[in-house]
Image: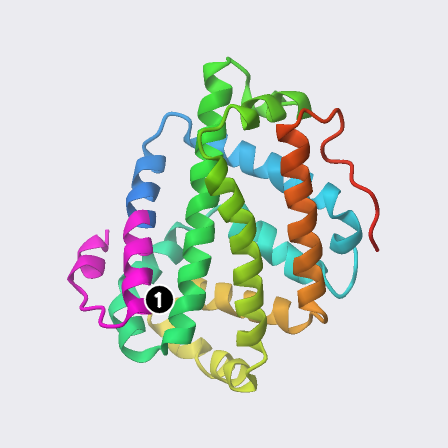
């Protein structure tokens, strides 16, 4: 709906241009996905993978210091549903973002957009691979998941996805340590509602609150990345129990 605003905005800095390009790619992908016959299956795949991630990282997910941050990652970033208005609003306010936000914040947003885009592209590919094999998405087993995973043509994107989790997590951690941000989010709630941006504001506030509560974010990210890299190697090497990892806490 707001693609023309993305295209017509003069993005003068490198960070603004990167965000602009990613938003254009994400905008076009969202419209492609919305019209895809396997649209509903992508959410089934995303939910399955979100539950797998919770199981693999159950110790971290149940840890009071990490639970909210992982919940935000899995619900708002990894398996988003009902986020069309939020995404449309990001497109809509892009001209104001590049005018008023510093490059550091534009880089954080660019990382979030790229992570969301790659994740949804990979989910669609898995849905297509399952369909090719006539495997109903809602009955998928771990063995079937690993089979289609190994058939993926996007393994480099999967490696990129894991590293983006680390990059975005570290950027968000630095970002939320700025006390001024919390004050600005509180003060901007009413104006956001008046501008019909409450869904975008709530998304930002949830992310801020979740990461603000966490301690030792570097340790969390290190363990997430190490484990997910191990899971990927296990799947590609045909390990009989690819999601069962040695405890490291």
Residue at the image point whose x is 41% and y is 67% from the top: 107
Rendering colour mode: rainbow
Q: Nearer the viewer, residue 99 or 12?
A: 12
Residue 204, visible in the rendered structure: yes
Where does the C terminus fall, quadrant-wise?
bottom right
Q: The magenta stretch spans which residues?
A: 1-25
Residue at the image point whose x is 28% and y is 60% from the top: 20
Count every numbered label the image shows and give the total. 1
Residue 198, visible in the rendered structure: no
Label 1 CA crowd tier, 10 Å (few <14, some 14–19, many 20+): few
Q: Position of residue 5 (x, y in %)?
A: 20, 61
Residue at the image point whose x is 60% and y is 57% from the top: 72
Left or right, residue 185 beside residue 50: left
Left or right, residue 93 beside residue 143: left
Q: Position of residue 94 (x, y in %)?
A: 29, 66
User: Would you identify the image quadrant in which residue 194 lies?
Assistant: bottom left
Q: Nearer the viewer, residue 231 or 99?
A: 231
**Mark 1: which secondary structure?**
loop
Magenta stretch encompasses residue 21:
yes
User: Which residue does the numbered mark 1 point to in the structure image?
Assistant: 196
Main secondary structure found in the magenta portion: helix
| Above or below for 189 versus 14 | below
Magenta stretch encompasses residue 173:
no
Residue at the image point whose x is 62% and y is 29% from the top: 236
Q: Position of residue 188 (x, y in %)?
A: 43, 80
| Above or below for 36 versus 100 | above
Left or right, residue 110 beside residue 73: left
Q: Position of residue 66 (x, y in %)?
A: 72, 62
| Above or below for 232 versus 241 | below
């Amino acid at each position: 709906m707001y693609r023309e605003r993305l295209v017509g905005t003069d993005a003068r800095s490198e960070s603004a241009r990167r965000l602009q390009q990613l938003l254009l790619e994400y905008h076009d992908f969202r419209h492609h996905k919305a019209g895809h016959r396997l649209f509903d299956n992508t959410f089934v795949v995303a939910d399955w993978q979100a539950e797998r991630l919770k199981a693999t990282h159950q110790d971290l997910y149940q840890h009071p210091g990490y639970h909210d941050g992982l919940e935000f990652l899995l619900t708002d970033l990894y398996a988003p549903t009902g986020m069309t208005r939020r995404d449309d609003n990001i497109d809509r306010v892009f001209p104001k973002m590049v005018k008023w936000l510093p490059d550091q914040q534009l880089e954080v947003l660019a990382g979030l957009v790229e992570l969301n885009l790659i994740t949804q592209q990979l989910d669609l590919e898995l849905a297509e691979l399952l369909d090719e094999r006539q495997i109903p998405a809602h009955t998928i087993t771990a063995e079937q998941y690993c089979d289609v995973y190994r058939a993926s043509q996007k393994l480099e994107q999967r490696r990129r996805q894991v590293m983006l989790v680390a990059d975005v997590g570290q950027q968000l951690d630095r970002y939320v340590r700025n006390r001024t941000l919390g004050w600005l989010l509180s003060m901007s709630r009413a104006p956001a509602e008046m501008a019909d941006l409450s869904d975008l504001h709530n998304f930002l506030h949830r992310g801020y609150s979740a990461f603000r509560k966490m301690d030792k974010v570097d340790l969390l990210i290190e363990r997430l990345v190490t484990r997910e890299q191990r899971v990927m190697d296990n799947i590609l090497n045909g390990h009989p129990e690819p999601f069962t990892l040695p405890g490291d806490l």
